[in-house]
Amino acid sequence: MNYDIKKMTALEFVEKSIDGVPEEVCVLRTAERRKAKVVTVSDEFKHYANSFSDVRIINIKELYYSLTPIFIPNRIITVRILKRGMNHNEGIGYIEGVKIVVMDGAKYINQTVNVRVCSMLQLESGNLVFATLNESPKEFEEEKKGMDNGDQRT
């Protein structure tokens, strides 16, 4: 589905600013008068949000981060390896825009594999997940059974 936002919504760009008044305040005043929402990628609006409690501020970056999946260590995920990583043995895949770096995954390019999450970094440019190839199903079931019996593996 392609949506043409110009046809769906009335957009207004605030071009006038008052000397000495921050641009964000001018935008928030205009939104308050028009009972409108402010959609932004700027973090500066947070500083003024308390003064304009009737104005809904939607930060696109915060929305993106809230919708991005969180990958917890030891979680098993399925990813398609698309290309080699920076190191010759790494494979790179993506899940919902999140880059997954798989150790020893380069030999599985154009294949879908199960991997175990090692760690996840939340960066300004997006999330980055490091993973290893999952153990064989038999080894995984034995490990799971051991954990069910109270054993813990670190």
Image: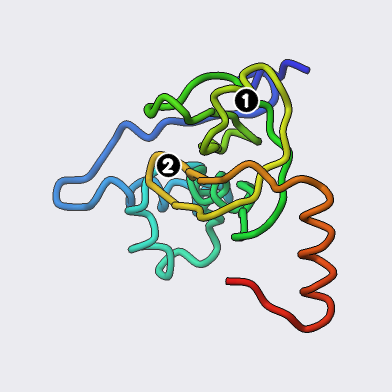
Q: Residue 145 carries which label?
A: none
Of badges 1 and 2, the one in the foreground is: 1
Q: Which of 3 and 35 is in front in this view?
A: 3
Depth check, front residue: 126 or 84: 84
Question: How many badges with numbers are in the image?
Answer: 2
- The three-letter amino acid code for the residue at tag 2 is Val
Q: In this view, does 21 lie above or below 3?
A: below
Q: In this figure, which colouring scheme has been used for the structure?
A: rainbow
How far, Cα to Cα, is label 1 from label 2?
31 Å
Vertical comparison of 85 with 24: above or below: above
First in residue order: circle 1 vs circle 2 = 2
Which residue appears at 33% of the width and 49% of the height? Answer: 24
Q: Name the residue under label 2.
A: 41
Indicate the position of residue 13 as horizontal and vertical percent values: 42, 31
Residue 67 versus residue 143 in the image, above or below: above
Quick one: SS at disc 2?
Answer: loop
Q: Which quadrant of the rendered structure holds the C terminus? A: bottom right
- The residue to which callout 1 is attached is 81
Residue drawn at x 47%, y 28% as measured from the top left = 89
Q: In this view, does 70 lie above or below 146?
A: above
Labels 1 and 2 touching (C-beta < 8 A): no
Percent from the top left, x then y, of residue 142? 82, 63
Nearer to us in this view, 23 or 46 = 46
Element at label 1: loop
Q: Does residue 34 appear left or right of residue 15 in this picture?
A: right
